[in-house]
Structures are given as C-alpha cells and as structure tokens.
Image (cartoon, grey):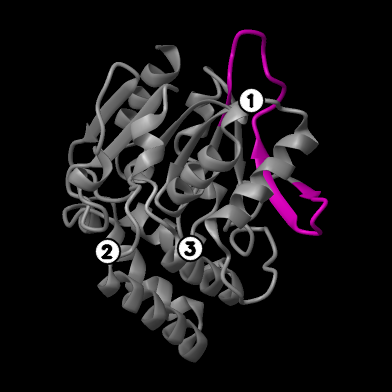
Amino acid sequence: MSKKSIAQHQVRLGNGIELAYYDSGEQEPGKPALVLLHGFCGSSAYWERVVARLAQHARIIAPDLRGQGNSPAAGEEAYTMELYADDLAGMLEHLNIPRVTLLGHSLGGYVTLAFADRYPDKLQAFGLVHSTPFPDSEAAKGNRDKAVAAIRKDGIVPFVDGLVPKLFAPESLESRAEQVGRAKEIGYGTSEAGAIGAALGMKERPDRNVILAETNLPLLLLAGELDAIIPVEKTLVVDGNNVTQVILKGAGHMGMLEQPDAFVQAVTGFLNK
C-alpha cells in the first residue's frame, strides 16, 4: 500500500502492461466479484472508505488504471477506453474470474461502458457512478486539450490542486476538508503521462447510450445531487425493470468519499437485488 493507492497486488499482463490492484480476498460461494474502477487522477484509494463494508457482500477488486495510482504509465498517447477495458479483461483472466459486477466512477464509468461493449459475456451486472454514456461536447474536448497543455507545462500537482475542489459539492469543501485533501493526495500520485493519456482517451470516446438502452443486465445508475461535473440528468438516462437509479443527497462528483454510508447502502442494495 501507499498514500496514493490501497493496491496490495501487481500483475504483468500479456500486453506488457503492469497493473496494481486491491483484492479483498477469496470469493465466497454465493457472493459476486465486484470490480470498482476509479475516476481521472484517482486510484483504488478512492474506494478506501467503502471497501471493508462492501467486502461483506462481495469479493472486491479495485485496480489502479494504467498510469494512475501504483500502475505505471505506458507512453503519452491516448489511453482509449477500449485500451483500459482490454487491461481489465487481462487482469480478470489472470485472476481466473469469469464474470463480474462492474461499477465505474467517472472515467471508470467510460471504461465500464467500453467493457460492456467488448466483453458482455464477462458481466453479471454493471453500473455508472457519477458517469455518463454521452461523449465529450466540443467545449469539453477543448478543455481536455487545455488539461494536457497545463500538465505538460506545470506538472501534475497544480493541475490536481485546480481539479479536485471542482469534484466536491460546495458545502463539502469545508465540511469534508479532510476528504478533499485526501483526494488531492491521491491525485498527486498520478503520473503526468497517465493523466495525459487518460485525458486524450476521454476526448476520443464515442456515444455509448445504446449500451444502456439495449442491455438486459442489472444496471445501477448512481448520481450526485450536487455534481457539477456530470449532472444527474446525464447519468440517469434510462429506466426499466433492470435499472436501479440512485441520487446521493448532498454529494458532488465524489459520493464514495462525500457520502460513504449512502454509497454503501446503494451498492449493497443493488448487489442484493
């Protein structure tokens, strides 16, 4: 473990990529394997306030995406969502886990959708946490380019200092100042190449609304009431008998850190359905 990650294991995949990951332990009979994918400039440590309780209901696997946390970067080219999805598939093959429930936060949600597109037979259920199936707008694509330029010019620390406060609900900046500081500490552990690759990859991602519209798998859509990054209506885009919609009251874009009790309740309720 380190300050930037809770990962205690590392694997080298067939594609040469090294991935660090947290694993709560052997999968008990009757319990699912739950994979948690963190957001941009994050790591497995984003889940540190919830993994112990979630592990009572599932085997928890929380990787550090390439270039973030304890997972090394692999160049500054675009890390497409498909690339991340292939990394995850390789890790699950290494762990001999045939099917999982997959929940992705923000960037991790984009990866989740790519995984659902490429590897539907490996999913029991999936969900988006403060994420969306919509692609970047033209304005958002411009902001990705600005982010890349800023990281190349000034490095990761000032970029993270500017990014993290926007991820929390306004009231959380004071009432949960410790968690804001923790998110910055985690973010500082992101390699410059990893952040650049992720930003360029997010810029390229396609519209994947059709994945949510056509799936018959159990689907969790979890949004933050006060999320200024991805508003509620961009997450809760479908409904149906297979869909569980949750709005975390008082949460911004970081529900697992801002409202961990409500987050655990939402996820365990979904798992137990």
Of callouts 1 and 2, the N-terminal one: 1
Query: Which stretch did the figure color magenta?
Result: 10-34
Total marks placed: 3
Residue 11 left/right relative to 52: right
What whole-number distance in Å separates the C-alpha atoms at marks 2 and 3?
A: 13 Å
Nearest the eye: 88 or 178: 88
The residue where tag 3 is placed is 41
Residue 118 left/right relative to 154: right
Q: Nearer the viewer, mark 1 or mark 2?
A: 1
Residue 13 left/right relative to 156: right
Magenta stretch: includes residue 20: yes
- What kind of residue is marked 3? Cys
The residue where tag 1 is placed is 99
Instruction: Give how far across and how far down residue 138 sits, in percent.
Output: 28, 72
What whole-number distance in Å separates the C-alpha atoms at marks 3 and 1?
A: 27 Å
122 up-or-down from 79: above or below: above
Instruction: Give how far across and how far down residue 130 sits, in percent.
Output: 33, 46
Of callouts 3 and 1, the N-terminal one: 3
Instruction: Give how far across and how far down residue 84 sits, in percent.
Output: 60, 53
* Crowd tier of the residue under label 1, counting other residues whose Cα lies within 10 Å: few below 14, some 14–19, many 20 or above: some
Disc ID at residue 166: 2
- In this rendering, does residue 5 appear at all? no
| Residue 79 image-quadrant placement | bottom right
Nearest the eye: 166 or 91: 91
